[in-house]
Image (spheres, helix red, strand yellow):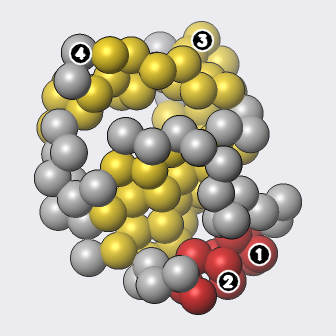
Amino acid sequence: MDTATSPLNSTSFDAFARDAREAGYDEVLQRDWQPNTVVAQHSHPFDAHAVLIQGEMWLTCDGVARHITAGGSFTLPKGTPHAERYGSEGASYWVARRT
């Protein structure tokens, strides 16, 4: 799990989508999560890079929970087991996926 600043941390969805496609991502979308949602450990068949635009979340990989707030980002390589928990206000993020 990478939480470093990325060139995909854009200030608008259109700019994020453009930058993501230029970086080789083939799908870009916004995900919205209800307050206090918990997603058990799982993995995805794609690489993902996301920028949290509202709310907060905790992303757990290898037993380590990372608190991410609006403006923060994370990258998950394909197949990385992880769990998610969203805050009391829910959360929204832009995510780029590469299959």
Q: Amino acid at mark 4?
A: Gly
Q: Residue furthest right?
A: 11
Viewer-side residue, 61 vs 40: 61
Which of discs 4 and 3 lies nearer the camera? The answer is: 4
Image point (75%, 76%), residue name: 14
Contact between marks 2 and 3 (CB within 8 A): the answer is no
Query: Which residue, given by chain and number where applicable, does mark 2 sit on?
Result: 18
Q: Which sits earlier in the primary sequence, circle 1 or circle 4?
A: 1
Query: In screen coordinates, is 77 left or right of 72?
Result: left
Position of residue 91 in the picture relative to residue 10 (left or right): left
Q: Are the residues flagged by discs 1 and 3 in contact, CB closer than 8 Å?
A: no
Q: Quadrant of residue 59?
A: top left
Determine contact: label 1, label 2, CB under 8 Å.
yes
Instruction: Identify the mark at residue 51; answer none if there is no mark.
Output: none
* Vertical order, 51 against 26 (above or below): above
Residue at 45% over, 43% down: 2
Q: Position of residue 17 (x, y in %)?
A: 64, 76
Q: Amino acid at mark 3?
A: Ser
Q: Which residue is mark 3?
A: 88
* Distance from the alpha carbon under mark 1 to that under mark 3: 28 Å
Residue that carries the numbered disc 1 in the rendered image: 15
Instruction: Tell me the mark number nearer the camera, choosing from 1 and 3.
Output: 1
Please say if the residues under marks 2 and 4 sit with CB atoms less than 8 Å apart: no
Q: Report the amino acid beneath label 1.
A: Ala
Could you say whether the residue bearing mark 4 is in a helix, strand or loop? loop
Vertical placement of residue 51 versus 12, above or below: above
Sequence-first disc among 4 and 3 = 4
**15, above or below 43, in the image:** below
Q: Are marks 4 and 3 in contact (CB under 8 Å)?
A: no
